[in-house]
């Protein structure tokens, strides 16, 4: 299985994280939804952008 479908999905690496994006208009063609069928799915967490930025803001506020 390809992790990303060209023209639909994109994947990027970060410090201790993987970032994925997909075109909403072509979401039904995305390969990213197939991750739920993989054994690794039980060991990871997936968050959308809004949740991720909210968590970051909460962590920043806790440090202040």
Image: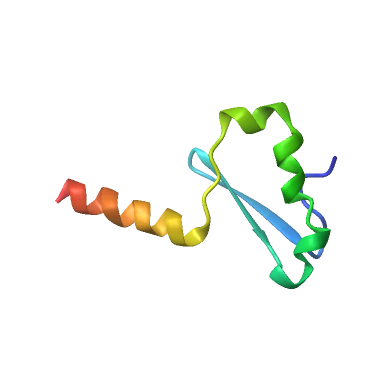
Residue for point 36% across, 58% down: 54
Tell me which corner region of the image, top left, top right, bottom left or bottom right, holds residue 2: top right
Q: Position of residue 58 (x, y in %)?
A: 27, 52
Residue nearer the viewer, 5 or 41: 41
Direction from residue 51 to residue 31 in the image, left or right: right
Q: Position of residue 13 (x, y in %)?
A: 59, 46
Residue nearer the viewer, 46 or 15: 46
Direction from residue 31 to residue 39 in the image, left or right: left
Residue for point 53% across, 42% down: 17
Tell me which corner region of the image, top left, top right, bottom left or bottom right, holds residue 22: bottom right
Exactly how many numbered labels are in the figure? 0
Q: Position of residue 52 (x, y in %)?
A: 44, 54
Q: Residue 24, relative to residue 55: is it above or below? A: below
Q: Residue 55, relative to residue 8: is it above or below? A: above
Q: Quadrant of the N terminus?
A: top right
Given the current orientation, which residue lies at the most extreme bottom position? 25
Q: Position of residue 34 (x, y in %)?
A: 77, 44
Residue for point 61% across, 29% down: 42
Residue for point 78% across, 68% down: 26
């Amino acid at each position: 299985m390809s992790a990303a479908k060209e023209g639909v999905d994109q994947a990027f690496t970060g410090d201790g994280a993987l970032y994925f994006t997909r075109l909403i208009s072509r979401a039904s063609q995305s390969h990213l939804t197939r991750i739920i069928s993989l054994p690794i799915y039980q060991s990871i967490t997936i968050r959308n952008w809004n949740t991720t930025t909210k968590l970051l803001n909460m962590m920043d506020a806790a440090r202040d």
